[in-house]
Image (cartoon, helix red, strand yellow):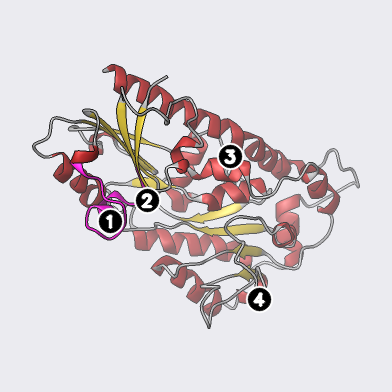
């Protein structure tokens, strides 16, 4: 078991997942670990604590950056290089950004991407022993809303979605939140005097009363190296057995499929995922949404669950969607296990000099 000198803030974000390292040692360290939500912000005195060279106990440094760095090359990588400049330190960066093209990987230090939020979703966000039965028992009811979309921080692509829904007169067709904590925000999930729980719990009622989610990921554009970064949104939607569109970076759906999940190209157009031009991609997302939102509630229901049903809760056209949702739900802990093992293997190789 490697002895780790832990530095930074919210260090439990790493140690709670990777329990196979020793974080209690006071000597004979094998590596230093700096945990941060934004290394480039930390080093520019916009967050605490700062990583100081004098605090390092070894010549092997792991930086675990568990929040957004975009653009990654000009924010995270440039700041790491500045810190390492002139120092004899071997460094491994672990971040949430999956770099799409290997030619964009750094060559002067090691790098690994990691889906941090899948662990949060697997362990939290409600535990329903009968989630599959709930889905089957309610599939024959027409749902009052077509879509569900959570939008907290008003990033430009989220504002564009809001404008699209208003302009096309779709707003009443869905559950839609936008800046829920602001005075003029749209709030669908909690009473104002209560604590905001939408990021720690799933409101299952909103999922059961809508047909699909429109996920607006944190990052849509601004890449200097094409990456995919996933937050809790897509994983919590899978846990709630909800189909989804993704307004995010290009190849997000492709990454999910390569990770073993299934998406919904048999139900609507997902070609937007392959478009790297950000303006063209958002237009393609809206066109795909328009094709289904222009339809009646009854037709949307039949598109999702099939045109016919013989009363069976064990077979029928509806199982086509259900099998995808069930697969994704059951694959969440598998993906978490795979992600964890990937990081452990990388750290072992890094410390052993492989």
Cα–Cα span, label 1 and label 3: 35 Å
Tell me if 162 is positioned left or right of 69 in this view.
Answer: right
Q: Residues within 10 Å of mark 4 (few under 14, many from 20)?
A: few
Mark 4: secondary structure: helix
User: From the viewer's perspective, is the residue at label 2 or at label 3 nearer?
Assistant: 2
Q: Please state, as top left, top right, bottom left or bottom right, where the C terminus lies in the image.
A: top left
Nearer the observer: mark 4 or 1; the answer is 1
Residue 85's image quarter?
A: top left
CA neighbours of label 3 inside 10 A, class few (<14), some (14 to 19), many (20+): some
Closer to the chain start, of discs 3 and 4, is: 4
275 in the magenta segment: no
**Mark pair 2, 3: CA separation:** 29 Å
Disc 4 from disc 1: Cα separation: 40 Å
Residue density around tag 2, few if under 14, some if 14–19, many if 20 or more, within 10 Å = many
- Of label 1 and label 3, which has the lower sequence position? 1
Check disc 2 and report the residue beneath it: 37
**Disc 1 designates what residue?**
41
Q: Quadrant of the N terminus?
A: top left
Residue at 67% across, 43% down: 325
The numbered dot on residue 172 is 4
Residue 237 x/y as whole percent:
61, 51
Q: Is residue 37 magenta?
A: yes
Q: State whether the magenta stretch is mostly helix, strand or loop.
A: loop
- Furthest toward the front, the residue is 26
Residue, far bottom: 184
- What range of the chain is rendered magenta? 35-53
Image quadrant where residue 203 sits: bottom right
Q: Position of residue 289 (x, y in %)?
A: 56, 62
| Front position among marks 1 and 3 | 1
Q: Secondary structure at mark 3?
A: loop
For disc 3, the marked residue is: 262
Q: Label 4 near label 2: C-beta < 8 Å?
A: no
């Amino acid at each position: 078991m490697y002895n780790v000198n832990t530095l930074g803030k919210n260090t439990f974000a790493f140690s709670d997942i990777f329990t196979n390292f020793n974080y209690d040692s006071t000597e004979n360290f094998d590596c230093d670990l700096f945990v941060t939500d934004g290394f480039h912000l930390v080093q520019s005195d916009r967050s605490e604590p700062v990583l100081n060279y004098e605090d390092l106990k070894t010549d092997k440094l792991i930086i675990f950056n568990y929040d957004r760095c975009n653009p990654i090359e000009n924010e995270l990588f440039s700041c790491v290089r500045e810190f390492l400049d002139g120092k004899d330190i071997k460094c491994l960066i672990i971040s949430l950004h999956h770099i799409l093209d290997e030619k964009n990987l750094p060559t002067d230090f090691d790098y690994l991407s990691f889906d941090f939020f899948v662990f949060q979703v697997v362990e939290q966000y409600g535990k329903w022993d009968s989630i599959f039965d709930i889905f089957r028992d309610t599939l024959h009811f027409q749902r009052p809303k077509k879509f569900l979309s959570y939008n907290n921080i008003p990033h430009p692509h989220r504002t564009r979605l809001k404008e699209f829904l208003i302009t096309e007169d779709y707003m009443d067709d869905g559950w839609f939140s936008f800046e829920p904590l602001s005075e003029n925000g749209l709030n669908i999930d909690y009473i104002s005097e209560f604590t905001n729980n939408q990021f720690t719990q799933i409101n299952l009622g909103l999922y059961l009363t809508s047909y699909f989610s429109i996920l607006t990921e944190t990052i849509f554009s601004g890449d200097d190296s094409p990456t995919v970064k996933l937050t809790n949104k897509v994983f919590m939607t899978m846990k709630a057995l909800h189909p989804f569109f993704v307004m995010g970076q290009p190849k997000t759906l492709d990454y999910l499929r390569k990770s073993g999940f299934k998406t919904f190209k048999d139900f609507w157009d997902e070609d937007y995922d392959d478009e790297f031009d950000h303006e063209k991609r958002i237009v393609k997302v809206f066109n795909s949404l328009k094709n289904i939102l222009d339809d009646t509630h009854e037709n949307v229901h039949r598109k999702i669950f099939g045109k016919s049903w013989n009363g069976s809760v064990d077979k029928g056209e509806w199982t086509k969607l259900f099998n995808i949702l069930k697969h994704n739900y059951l694959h969440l802990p598998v993906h978490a296990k795979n992600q964890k093992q990937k990081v452990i293997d990388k750290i072992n190789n890094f410390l052993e000099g492989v």
